Amino acid sequence: KMAEAFGLTLDQCAAFGDGLNDADMLQMAEVGIAMGNGKDNCKAAADYVTDTQENDGLYKACLHYGWIERDFHEN
């Protein structure tokens, strides 16, 4: 529904998830990313498993895919 609202197709979307109900969404998106603390079925459905939410998993996944660049001030 969100992709449709923004005029996007699913092959233009990435999805992040961690719950039992997120597996279908991860499979439907072009890029499905499971959080490291996610449920096993969610991880199995994902294209990539990142770190936990508490350990900057969203940030690390975006770095992995080249969507953002590493901040040179970062340790």
Image (tube, grey):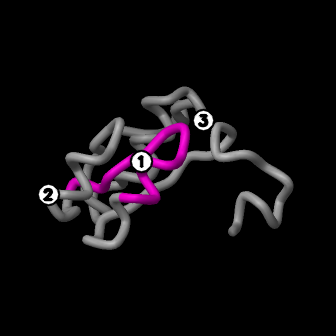
Q: Where, quadrant-wise, is the N terminus in this rendering?
A: bottom right
| Image-quadrant location for residue 5 | bottom right
Question: Upstream in the sequence, badge 3 or badge 1?
Answer: 1
Reading the image, the residue beneath label 2 is: 40
Q: Where, quadrant-wise, is the C terminus in this rendering?
A: top left
Instruction: Identify the magenta region.
Output: 24-36
Q: Residue furthest left?
A: 40
The x, y position of residue 24, in whole percent, is 40, 59
The x, y position of residue 33, in whole percent, is 39, 47
Question: Upstream in the sequence, badge 2 or badge 1?
Answer: 1
Considering depth in this image, is 58 or 75 the residue closer to the camera?
58
Task: Check residue 39 in the rendering and tell me which mark sits there, or answer none.
Answer: none
Q: Nearer the viewer, mark 2 or mark 1?
A: 1
Q: Residue at x 43, y 45 (%)?
A: 32
Q: Residue at x 60, y 35 (%)?
A: 68
Whether 28 is drawn above or below 67: the answer is below
Please give left or right for residue 21 compared with residue 14 in the image: left
Q: Residue at x 56, y 46 (%)?
A: 14
C-alpha separation, residue under disc 2 versus residue under disc 1: 14 Å
Question: What residue type is disc 2 on?
Answer: Asp
Circle 2 packing at 10 Å, graded few (<14), some (14-19), many (20+), is some
Considering depth in this image, is 8 or 75 the residue closer to the camera?
8
Q: Residue at x 33, y 37 (%)?
A: 48
Task: Check residue 68 in the rendering and tell me which mark sits there, or answer none.
Answer: 3
Task: Check residue 27 in the rendering and tell me which mark sits there, or answer none.
Answer: 1
Question: What residue type is disc 3 on?
Answer: Ile
Circle 1 packing at 10 Å, graded few (<14), some (14-19), many (20+), is some
Q: Is residue 68 within the magenta segment?
A: no
C-alpha separation, residue under disc 3 versus residue under disc 1: 23 Å
Please give left or right for residue 8 compared with residue 19 in the image: right
Secondary structure beneath disc 2?
helix
